[in-house]
Image: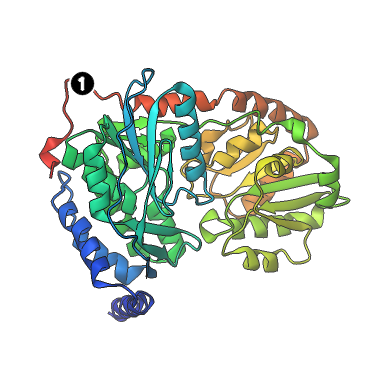
Amino acid sequence: MRVETAGYRNRFQTALRNLQASRGMRPVDVINGFRMVQPLRSLHVPGESFDMAHLAMELFTRLQLSYTPCVVPPGRFSVSAVPARSRTARRRVGLFVDAPDHLSGVAMTLREWQEQAELAGEELFVHSCGQVVRDGHAVTFPPMGVLSLGMYEGLALPIPRIDDVMAYVQRMPFDAIHVSTPGPMGLLGLLAARQRGIPVCGTYHTDFPRYAGELTGDPGAVELGWRFMRWFYGQLDRVAAPTESVKRELIEHSLDARRLRVVGRGVDTTRFHPGFRDTAWRAAHGPGRSLKLLYVGRLSREKNLHVLAEAFRRLVPTRPDVALVLVGDGPCRAELERMLHGAPATFTGVLSGEALARAYASSDLFVFPSKTDTFGRVVLEAQASGLPVIVSDAGGPKDAMQDGRTGVVVRDLDADSLARAMDEVTNDPARMALYRRQAIAFASRQSLAASFSAFWNLHRLDETRSPRKEHAL
């Protein structure tokens, strides 16, 4: 009873903090939110009881949220003319994405698919919300406000005017809509597709339930997350999973296996390859130590980096030849710097372009301890650069490498098992050299063109089967 009472007290306090953080919300913002949530309440998944209003209340009392209103430009958003269909395009797909500028593997994958669509002469229109841009096949709606999640620092979700999106989609002759995330833009993409009666597909990019549990410490947030995932992805005609492991997990959580497809990821081997290896970089990062261990990604709790830091500290006393380089930034950087104080560890901050390629190619072993990633594109980038990799047996990264050929999958990863794996691999030069050659060969087979082709073919729904009009609004 005390635990239950404490839980209610915590949720009440969270709600009060959220009210305080969102005190600038205007009546027009409330109306806009209601006009999105209300029609979503009419969408149902067989066997799944879910209410969007109840979800909103659960989120408001479990997660730290804040809403910041934006100055809404006068008039209505409009596209001057509907572009004529390209003669080479097989179909026209509208992709709806939240936070496309966020420094994440998801955002980078979406940009690559857009680039591949242009190269292939296909029509992929990418829709987001933020600073208004009309650039070819990229359409950005002006925001009414921005929703921020306290548990995920740096991630902001702009919310557009509902009428703008719905009116726009009514004018655009899309053959299908694809939603990349279950945020405001993803929800509006779903609504628009059902309103139009056209197919809607989506990608399960991010393990939101596990993220919610890791970042909040609230077990109830995990189950709430899965209920929402079942409801959202259960609406879609097809769902892309990045790996077989993720596909199996979705099936275990009651998503319809008949609608699931595996759409893998590719890597640009001209951007990431061993030729960027730089002796000056090696001398500057862990000077005097011949083996450079590398991590690339967000520095946050859900990446399991406290385990990496502890494992490295246990390794260092017996291995004076190793150094650790962490590329990226995030809310846990200061904590990690404290944990690794006095150890041969370097924090570079965020790197991109050739600087990132140089960091990969100039290192010797890539270590990625995350248990929450659905793929981990950095694992592919590391292998393309000639690095053996060490990953956890949880999540999707283990499907982005070959255990025992391009690196090692650590079962039940903790500080001890990770330290042992790093020690064993780096202590065997012949094994390292073999993994290196096989990593380069494996990555060379993971092409961007093949990844895009699988994504694009996802929308080739059976012409004889109409979309799920029983859910049309």
* Image quadrant containing the N terminus: bottom left
Residue 62 drawn at (x, y percent): 34, 69
Residue 343 drawn at (x, y percent): 77, 61
Residue type at mark 1: give it. Answer: Glu
Q: Residue at x 60, y 28 (%)?
A: 443
Q: Residue at x 77, y 46 (%)?
A: 292
In which quarter of the view is residue 316 placed? bottom right
Residue 66 drawn at (x, y percent): 38, 70
Q: Is residue 365 left or right of residue 77?
A: right
* Residue 254 visible in the current orientation: no
Q: Identify the residue position indicated by label 1 in the image.
A: 463
Q: Is residue 32 left or right of residue 445?
A: left
Q: Is residue 18 left or right of residue 378?
A: left
From the viewer's side, name the closer residue of 158 and 387. Answer: 158
From the viewer's side, name the closer residue of 430 and 213. Answer: 213
In which quarter of the view is residue 366 placed? top right
Secondary structure of residue under mark 1: loop
